Each structure stands twice: as C-alpha cells, then as structure tokens.
Amino acid sequence: MIWHSSTYQDVLANLDVDPEKGLSAGVADERLGHYGPNLLTTNRKKPVILRFLAQFRNTMVIILLLAAAVSFFVQFLTKENHWYEPVIILAIVVANAALSTFQEVRAESALNALKAMTAPTAKVMRDGIVKLVDASQIVPGDVILLEAGDYVCADARLIETASFCCDESPLTGESVPAEKMADAVHDEIAPLSERSNMVYSGCSVTHGRGVAVVTETGMSSEIGKISTMLAQTGERAFPLKAKLESLGKMLAVLTLVVCAVVFVVTVIRNFASPDVSFAEMLLNTFITSISLAVAAIPESLPAIVTVVLALGVQRMVKRNAIIKNLPAVETLGSASVICTDKTGTLTMNRMTVTKLFDGRRTIDLAKDAITESGRMLLRLGAICSDAKVERNGSRKSNIGDPTEIGIADACAKYASISKQDIETGCPRFGEIPFDSERKLMTTVNM
C-alpha cells in the first residue's frame, strides 16, 4: 500500500488496528519480532587497524615500501651507515596512512549524528492506554500521539490533526514548517515535501497536536533510506587517485626497464675485467642498479599530496563540511557547477532577524542602533510566540517555528532579555491560535 495516496481509514484497515485502542501488547511484541527494533543500523564498522592497512593498497605506496626494503638491503650489503634514507621513506608512508585513517574515522560522525536525530521515547496507545515507551519498541500499526516539541519516532500516516505543523527540514531542506491535514489524499507520485498527510522519523512538531498510525520503522523509514545511502561507502575512483595510480604503474615499469638495461650493459662492459672477480662484479652491478631504482622513486610525492589535501580538508572543516576521503577534496575542487533544489540542505536552517519596523522607521540591526521602541517590538514578538529556547550550560536547544525562534533569539540579543524571563514577568492567560483566515496569533499576558 502507498500510504500517502490512501485514506487513513484504509491505512488503519490495512494495518489491522483500532485507532481508539491501538495495538495490544501481544500484537506489538509479535510485530516487533517480525519487523525488528525501530533503530537505524549501519554496516559493521571496520577496525581501525584494517582501515590503516587499507591505505597501503596504493601502487605508489607499494613502490615506496619496496624502495625502503631494497634500500635496507643495500645498506646491509654495503655495510654503510646511511640508514636514514629507508627510515625516512617508511616514516612518510606511515604518516600518510595515519592521516588518511584519522580523517575517515572522524568523518563517520556524520552517520552517528543521523542516528541521534531519532526520538528516544514516544507516546503510544497500547490496549486503550496512552503509554510512554522507548522509540525502539515502536512497530507498524502503533497509534502515536504528537504535540508541539515532540520528535517523530517513525514514519506515520496522520489520522487526526489540530493546527498541526511539522518541521521537515532534515528531509526536505524547507525551513518553513509544513502544515499537515489528516484528511488529505495525494497522488502516488507526490514528492515527500507535498505529502501533507504524513509525518516522518527525525522531524519535529512545531505547532498543534496530532494522532498518527505508524507505517514504516527503522531502516524502512525515509531517514533510514538516507542512512543506507550514507553507509554505502564503496570504493570510488577519484580523479587524483586514478592519476597517482597511473603514475605509480608507469614509474614502476620505467624503473624496472632502466635498471635492467643498466645491469645488463654494466655486466657486459665489465665481463672480462681482471680487477675484480665475476661474483663481486655482479654484486656491485646489482647494488648500483638497485640504488638507481631507489633514486628514481619520488619519495616526497605522496607526502606532498597528502599534506596539500589535508590542508584542503581543514579549510572545509572550518566551513562545517566533513570530507570522508582525502582525495574527495580534489574532486570537489574540480566541480564547476553544483545543482540543488533545496537551499535548506546547504545552510544552517536558521532564521535571523535583520531589520525591524517600529512604526516610524526601519532599523537595520547590523548597522543602526536599536531604539527603545525596537526593543519593545522584539519583546512583544517574543512573548506572542510558542517557541521554546532552552539552555543547558553552553548548549542551546530550539523547539518551535523557525521564525518564532529567530524572534526569540533577536530579543535576547538586542533587547537583553530572554523569552523565559518575559514569560515569568508577564505570564500568558489566554490565546487565540494562528489561522489562515485571521493571519495572526493573539495572546493575553499580564
């Protein structure tokens, strides 16, 4: 069944659930065993040591390791004390591998952050009783109750709404909350952003209240599908990596050819030399050829490439962009056009008050000094809103409409008073909710 193109009565019948009583405890346990827990799962993490060893599969790195081994062998044969050359080569290779591994491990925080977006608990109707249960125990067919400030624990079809709005920016990138209507029925091909009869896991309720029946959980939910795509980190042929692989293979072939030619020519020229024995001549010629091979390898090339890419990654980090693979920085730098249809996915999804009109003039908060009437306007705007701005030490959490949150933040910044302090001094005694006809919200505070 396609949930958003069906009436909620058909959805309830398909899931075999009574909206007044919800599922029984026995049926819920049976479905939990069938569908599994409502959790985002990922591929088994590769141990750090395996990630580290995987960095040595590059052709250039293999050539450097061979060069280091041969260099050690030459130093042993000649009994010279120039051990610093192979040691430096090994240090460069190990440092490159360590830096790349560190970047990959740190980038996994993006997927872990996605897991944190799911709700820890949910209000659910079981056996006719509203219960607060762990969100991981939610199953298809559960009837969940939602109100302003709640996080949606699973994808669900709405069956009852009252001035219900939901912030779906984690999925759609839209910063304005989406209005929801339980009676709506959409086309099968309707995009996610237009499905006003559905709520989705990872999103939050900004206004009103609603009742919904769960349709998809865990990895079957929309956010679960995103998690699946993020987990599919197969090998990618980055342009820079492909070029380095090609260069490494070419250097390997040319080096072997040149060394073989030098070895053969030297042996032929010194074959009848009376100064040294034939065995000693072969050994000296072999050492000379090997030394030539080591000298032909650009030991500093991988180090230079890694350092340059690491600097690029650090610049991206300062702009809040996490690069999972170092070579991806060069690929991103080669892009000339990036097409996107949602600005919210590229921004911080945060609204900010920039100008005020106090009835007489417009105040640009970035340039002009705020007036007393401007401060009063911000206080009135903050108190006539349902946004919640909660602080826990240095951390701040915002719940509610992004526009109202922006006004509350501006009030704290420019009027030097928090929304909580205003509400403490002037508690709300009554309100008329916002509706499309009046196009305003009214509160009574004293």
Image (cartoon, helix red, strand yellow):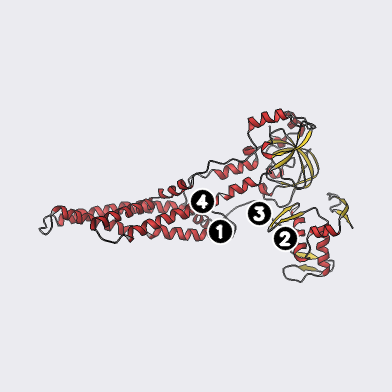
Q: Amino acid at mark 1?
A: Met
Q: Amino acid at mark 4?
A: Glu
- Indicate which disc, 4 or 2, sits on the residue closer to the N terminus: 4
- Indicate which disc, 4 or 1, sits on the residue closer to the N terminus: 4
Q: Nearer the viewer, mark 3 or mark 2?
A: 2
Q: Which residue is mark 4?
A: 104
Asked whether the viewer can see residue 9, the reply is yes
Q: Nearer the viewer, residue 200 or 116?
A: 116
Q: Are marks 2 and 1 in contact (CB under 8 Å)?
A: no
Disc 2 residue crowd, few under 14, some 14–19, many 20+, Cα 10 Å? some
**Local SS, label 1:** helix
Q: Which mark is residue 196?
A: none
- Residue at 69 percent of width and 41 percent of height: 153
Q: Which mark is residue 316?
A: 1
Disc 4 residue crowd, few under 14, some 14–19, many 20+, Cα 10 Å? some
Q: Quadrant of residue 295?
A: bottom left
Q: Which residue is mark 3?
A: 343
**Local SS, label 2:** loop
Q: Nearer the viewer, mark 4 or mark 3?
A: 4
- Residue at 67 percent of width and 53 percent of height: 344
Q: Nearer the viewer, mark 4 or mark 2?
A: 4
- Indicate which disc, 4 or 3, sits on the residue closer to the N terminus: 4
Is the C terminus in the top left, top right, bottom left or bottom right quadrant? Answer: bottom right
Q: Amino acid at mark 2?
A: Thr
What whole-number distance in Å separates the C-alpha atoms at marks 3 and 2? Answer: 15 Å
Q: Nearer the viewer, residue 101 or 362?
A: 101
Q: Amino acid at mark 3?
A: Thr
Note whether 169 is above or below 372 in the view shown: above
Q: Which mark is residue 352?
A: 2
